Image: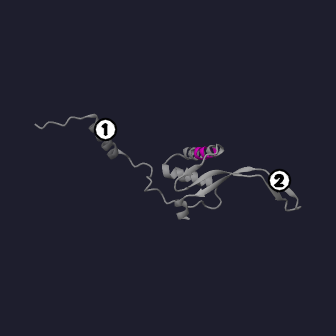
């Protein structure tokens, strides 16, 4: 009689992984099998369209997809408020820019006015975004 190989923690984990992979039912679409994405249709909000794209790509509920998008936007906003650069590799980066106080002219009256210093957000497109346009 042949002796069965001893099951160790290492081999037991592999066996479970293989068994799970075989028994796994088809789940949400993977990245390679994702549905063909389209531009935002006219007359709809971009945020709603992004939520539906997240929902379709991950298989999450519409509420969870909305919460995910809100968390992402809130994180970007909080980082910018702390003057930190937010970089999404391939897509682009957001950064805070400071504008100095300067003199301007009121176009209606021609009167000289003082424009206060301010902050703004600059977006710089990444290489994948530039190549895709």
Q: Is residue 12 left or right of residue 92?
A: left
Count of numbered marks:
2
- From the viewer's perspective, is residue 61 above or below residue 33? above
Display coloring: one colour
Is residue 40 inside the magenta stretch? no
Q: Which residue is mark 2?
A: 114
Please tell me which residue is depicted at 49% across the width and 60% down the height of the picture: 36
Is residue 73 inside the magenta stretch? yes
Q: Residue furthest left?
A: 1
Quarter of the image for the C terminus: give it: bottom right
Q: Which residues are magenta?
A: 71-77
Q: Is residue 33 left or right of residue 94?
A: left
Please tell me which residue is depicted at 52% across the width and 53% down the height of the picture: 89
Task: Tell me the tag on residue 13.
Answer: 1
Q: Position of residue 125 (x, y in %)?
A: 58, 58
Q: Secondary structure at mark 2?
A: strand
- Kindly report the distance in space between the C-alpha atoms of the residues bearing marks 1 and 2: 70 Å
Q: Position of residue 52 (x, y in %)?
A: 56, 52
Give whichever of 47, 76 is nearer the camera.
76
| Label 2 environment density (alpha carbons within 10 Å; few <14, some 14–19, many ≥20) | few
Task: Tell me the tag on residue 118.
Answer: none
Q: Main secondary structure of the magenta part?
A: helix
Q: Between disc 1 and disc 2, whose residue precedes?
A: 1
Quarter of the image for the N terminus: give it: top left
Q: Position of residue 123 (x, y in %)?
A: 62, 55
């Amino acid at each position: 009689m042949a002796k069965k190989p001893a099951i160790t923690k290492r081999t037991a984990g592999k066996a479970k992984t293989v068994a799970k992979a075989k028994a796994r039912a088809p789940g949400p679409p993977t990245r390679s099998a994702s549905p063909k994405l389209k531009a935002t249709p006219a007359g709809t909000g971009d945020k709603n369209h992004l939520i539906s794209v997240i929902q379709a790509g991950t298989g999450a509920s519409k509420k969870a997809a909305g919460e995910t998008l809100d968390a992402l936007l809130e994180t970007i906003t909080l980082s910018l408020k702390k003057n930190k650069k937010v970089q999404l590799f391939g897509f682009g980066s957001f950064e805070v820019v400071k504008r100095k106080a300067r003199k301007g002219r009121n176009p209606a009256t021609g009167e000289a006015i003082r424009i206060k210093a301010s902050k703004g957000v600059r977006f710089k497109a990444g290489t994948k975004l530039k190549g895709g346009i």
